[in-house]
């Protein structure tokens, strides 16, 4: 998996690509935690249009991101999620705490 951080006029965007699983999910957490403070009180978009697969570690990383963002009043929006990836969140009942657009 790869990730790219962009700042678009007051909105942060993280673009994820590939398989969000295993080690890539574990690598995501320190990277996002270093970046998150820059977006305090601003929205952060997680663009998942190129994520082909997500496992439990990937879902856990998204929940940790959600919790950390909530603490600093940052709203995280998950965008462009493929239906089969979104279904994984729904089946695990994780679609409720996360904000999908």
Image (tube, grey):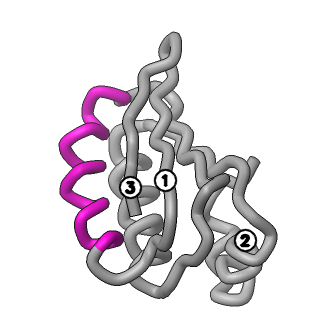
Considering only vertical position in the picture, is 95 above or below 30? below
Q: Mark 2 or mark 3, which has the lower sequence index?
A: 3
Q: Mark 1 or mark 3, which has the lower sequence index?
A: 3
Residue that numbered label 1 is attached to: 16
Q: Magenta segment range? A: 24-39
Q: Mark 2 or mark 1, which has the lower sequence index?
A: 1
Residue 32 forms part of the magenta stretch: yes
Residue 1 forms part of the magenta stretch: no
Using a 10 Å C-alpha cutoff, classify the residue at mark 2 as few (fewer than 14 neighbours), some (14 to 19) or many (20 or more): some
Q: CA distance from mark 1 to mark 3?
A: 6 Å
Residue that numbered label 2 is attached to: 86
Viewer-proximal residue, 7 or 65? 7
| Residue 93 percent location from the top left of the image | 67, 83
Disc 1 and disc 3 in contact, CB within 8 angstroms: yes
| Residue 1 percent location from the top left of the image | 40, 64
Residue at point 34% right, 39% down?
A: 72
């Amino acid at each position: 998996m790869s990730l790219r951080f962009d700042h678009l006029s007051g909105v942060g965007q993280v673009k994820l690509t590939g398989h969000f699983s295993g080690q890539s999910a574990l690598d995501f957490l320190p990277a996002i935690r270093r970046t998150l403070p820059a977006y305090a009180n601003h929205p952060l978009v997680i663009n998942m249009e190129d994520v082909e697969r997500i496992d439990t570690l990937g879902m856990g990383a998204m929940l940790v991101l959600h919790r950390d963002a909530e603490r600093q009043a940052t709203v995280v929006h998950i965008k462009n999620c493929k239906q089969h990836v979104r279904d994984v969140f729904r089946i695990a009942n994780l679609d409720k705490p996360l904000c999908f657009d």
